[in-house]
Amino acid sequence: MTTPTGSLWGGDQIRLDAYLARIRYEGDREPTLDALRQLHARHSASIAFENIDVVLGRPIPLDLATLQTKMIDRHRGGYCYEQNLLYAAALDRFGFRVTGLGARIRMGDDRLRPVTHALLKVELDGEDFLTDVGFGGSALLEPLPLRDGIEVRQGGWTFALAYEGETGTWALRSRTEDGWMDLYGFGTERRFPVDYAVFNHYISTHPRSPFVHRLVVQRPLPGLRTSLIGHELTRTRPDWSTEAREIAPEETPEVLETEFGITLPGPDAEALAAYQGSLRDAP
């Protein structure tokens, strides 16, 4: 039985013109390496990583209609499942061969963590490329060829891949001021949107999830990484100079707009400011 085109990633359902306008993409609509690079770069620069709905206690639906309303029409962001599922639909519509993958977050920590991160692989002209627009502040800015030992400069940041043969795991690494740091480890087992739905439930509801108890908003750009974690706004540049300041709860909606391009409607802005205030006042 033949699977209908677009049935897995929803390429037949995405409002492509609206998505491309949202990320300011004006290139060709063919499945080429240049298009893949531009789509990844423009999406990363335009749609911020954020967990606002999670901290406000709202569900995180992953159906494509909801994702388009949220990230295209309302100019909101999202976290890995939301971002990469919307991106995958666009890639599918372009005609790319997309495979979902899952990763264990490391961030320099050797502890074994569960598979909770969603990322994508694209096969193009006989080569596989890692592409991931949903990792937040330390994310790739462009696709990375899936080759052991590759090292690539993207904007002011340097990334590398290493194949850990004894476990069959790949490690995505980023160069830091103190040397290389593993961002996450991933295998090549194929993952599906239904898998991400299970991961999403854990990440958006479990008390041990890093996204349930504090606001996380991030944007990676070629020359600047900006993060709002809890009440602290941090800007980091490629020379590792850092500016950090505490954001008052009532400032939060304005900071979201000026730093991350997220404009909240009045009720949401008030609810988020109240949430931030409750954390600051907690004993």
Image: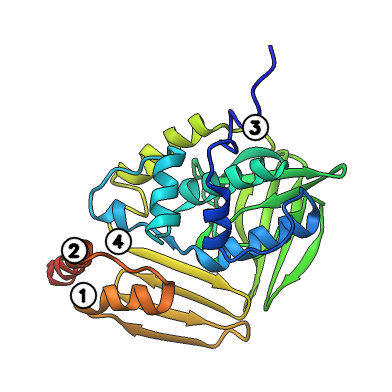
Considering the image in quadrants, where does the N terminus appear?
Answer: top right
**Residue 160 image point, x, y percent:** 74, 62
Residue identifier under label 2: 275
Write down the residue under mark 3: 190
Q: Secondary structure at mark 4?
A: loop
Q: Residue furthest front?
A: 17
Q: Kindly identify the amino acid type of the residue bearing the numbered disc 4.
A: Arg
Question: Can you identify the residue that label 1 sits on?
Answer: 249
The quarter holding residue 6 reads top right
- Image spot of residue 241 (x, y percent): 54, 88
Looking at marks 4 and 3 on the same chain, the residue that comes earlier in the sequence is marked by: 3
How far apart, in angstroms, are the residues tagged by discs 3 and 1?
41 Å
Count residues near mark 2 (Cα–Cα under 10 Å), then give few for <14, some for 14-19, many for 20+: some
Q: What is the secondary structure assignment of the residue under circle 2?
A: helix
- State the mark number for residue 214: 4
Query: In this picture, is 203 found above or below 260?
Result: above
Amino acid of disc 3: Arg
Q: Looking at the image, is mark 1 or mark 2 earlier in the sequence?
A: 1
Q: Residue at x 81, y 52 (%)?
A: 148
- Mark closest to the chain's N terminus, 4 or 2: 4
- Is residue 263 in view? yes
The image quarter in which residue 245 lies: bottom left
